[in-house]
Image: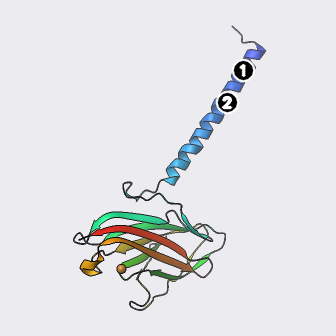
Amino acid sequence: MKPSVLGANKMLYALIAISVIAIGFGVYSSQQKAAAPKEVPQTQAAVQPAAQAGGLVSERANYDFGTISMKAGNVSTTYRIKNEGAAPLALDKIYTSCMCTTATLITANGRKQGPFGMPGHGPLKPATGQLAPGEMALLEVVFDPAAHGPSGVGRIERVVTVETKDARPLELWMVAMVRP
Ligand SMILES: [Cu+2]
């Protein structure tokens, strides 16, 4: 049985509609995958808008360590930062808001810089090199909950700042509830 011209047109429209829906779903799924950070434990990931400072961005602006114990020792988290601008960004300074917190930068070529700490506690080492447009780097942050002694219990907030010569400083925050 030959379909009528009208029937063939209807089938064609249906095929186009199915294709459009399929492509749309494919794009949606790939975006969902791209949006999920891989190294973040899902139970502790704070859902926050990504930090942005001109061309320098981080997929997360914030991290919640949850309730942690001084006895259990250091905790760490890694931020992925990226130069989303069109021009290279020259790294300048990386520093933390407190001596209990350090940050190490790992660039795409595997080179490590740091650990960087709080200004005034030890010499302030400059960060060197640059991030090319589209280049990513990792910032590994370690917090020592025992650094302040027994009085260091309670809620803490720390910030790591990444300064380049070309963009505004990028601030990456951490919070935790410290128990003995
Ligand atoms: Cu501290």
Q: Is residue 72 above or below residue 15?
A: below
Q: Is mark 2 on a helix, strand or loop?
A: helix
Q: Please give the label number shown on residue 17.
A: 2
Please tell me which residue is depicted at 30% across the width and 74% down the height of the picture.
Answer: 145
Q: What element carries label 1?
A: helix
Please tell me which residue is depicted at 51% across the width and 68% down the height of the picture.
Answer: 81
**Quadrant in which the N terminus appears:** top right
Image coords of residue 133 (percent x, y): 61, 69
Q: In which quarter of the image is residue 78?
A: bottom left
Q: Is residue 87 above or below residue 114?
A: above
Residue 64 placement, left or right of 167: left
* Amino acid on which the number 1 mark rests in the picture: Lys
**Quadrant in which the C terminus appears:** bottom left
Image coords of residue 95 (percent x, y): 46, 81
Quarter of the rendered structure image containing ligand 1: bottom left
Instruction: Mark 2 or mark 1: name the one nearer the start of the chain.
Output: 1
Name the one closer to the observer, 15 or 104: 104
Residue 33 placement, left or right of 67: right
Asked whether the beta carbons under mark 2 and mark 1 sit within 8 Å of each other, the answer is no
Q: Name the residue under label 1.
A: 10
* Amino acid on which the number 2 mark rests in the picture: Ala
The Cα–Cα distance between marks 2 and 1, rounded to whole angstroms, is 10 Å
Q: Please give the label number shown on residue 157.
A: none
Name the one closer to the observer, 109 or 149: 149
Image coords of residue 67 (percent x, y): 31, 63
Residue 9 placement, left or right of 159: right
Q: Is residue 119 above or below residue 20?
A: below
Image coords of residue 84 (percent x, y): 61, 66
Name the one closer to the observer, 156 or 40: 156
